Amino acid sequence: MSRTTALCASERREESSHMQRILVIEDEFFVAAHIEHVLEGEGVEVIGPVGSLQEAMQLARNVTVDGALLDVNIDGGRIDDVAEILARKCVPFVFVTAYGRDNLPPAHREAGVVDKPFKDEDLLREVRRFQTH
């Protein structure tokens, strides 16, 4: 377990009965809409989806969420800085990508990955893990 992971584990609040809030960062419209539909069907409050790095950075800094789903390549750029902000805030996240683990930000290669195209069950399994962090 990395030092950051250990610190985050000690800082995470105990699970409450509130609706889970998940930040979705995805620039492909149909993929984003599908993720939103799947999550809302499970009673999740979706923050986003957002498809620009600028908006993703702003939300990562300023919004309180229980987890995040991150596409690796957004709007012609990479999600690395957003992942770093979330990690510093102890927000668990999963990458949703078609590019595989080797294309993840090096500092976050241990994070969960949902490979595109994905099955809804695979996405939901990862989102449920946010509740145990």
Image (spheres, rainbow, N blue to C red):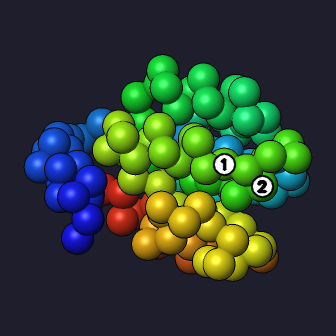
Q: Residue at x 26, y 65 (%)?
A: 2
Q: Is residue 64 above or below residue 7?
A: above
Q: Residue at x 76, y 74 (%)?
A: 99
Residue matched to label 2? 73
Residue matched to label 1? 79
Farthest-out residue, front: 106
Residue 82 x, y percent position in the rendering: 57, 41
Say whether residue 32 is visible: no
Residue type pointed to by label 2: Asn
Residue 18 x, y percent position in the rendering: 30, 36
Q: CA distance from mark 2 to mark 1?
A: 6 Å
Q: Residue at x 40, y 47 (%)?
A: 87
Left or right, 71 with respect to 31, comes to left
Residue 83 x, y percent position in the rendering: 53, 48
Q: Locate the C terminus by quadrant.
A: bottom left
Quarter where residue 73 is shown: bottom right
Say whether residue 102 is visible: yes
Q: Residues within 10 Å of mark 2 (few under 14, many from 20)?
A: many
Viewer-nearest residue: 128 or 61: 61
Task: Please tell me the numbered disc located at residue 112.
Answer: none
Assign a secondary structure to mark 2: strand
Q: Is residue 41 above or below residue 102?
A: above
Q: Residue at x 43, y 72 (%)?
A: 110
Q: Locate the N terminus by quadrant.
A: bottom left
First in sequence: mark 2 vs mark 1: 2
Residue 126 x, y percent position in the rendering: 47, 68
Marks 2,1: beta carbons within 8 A: yes
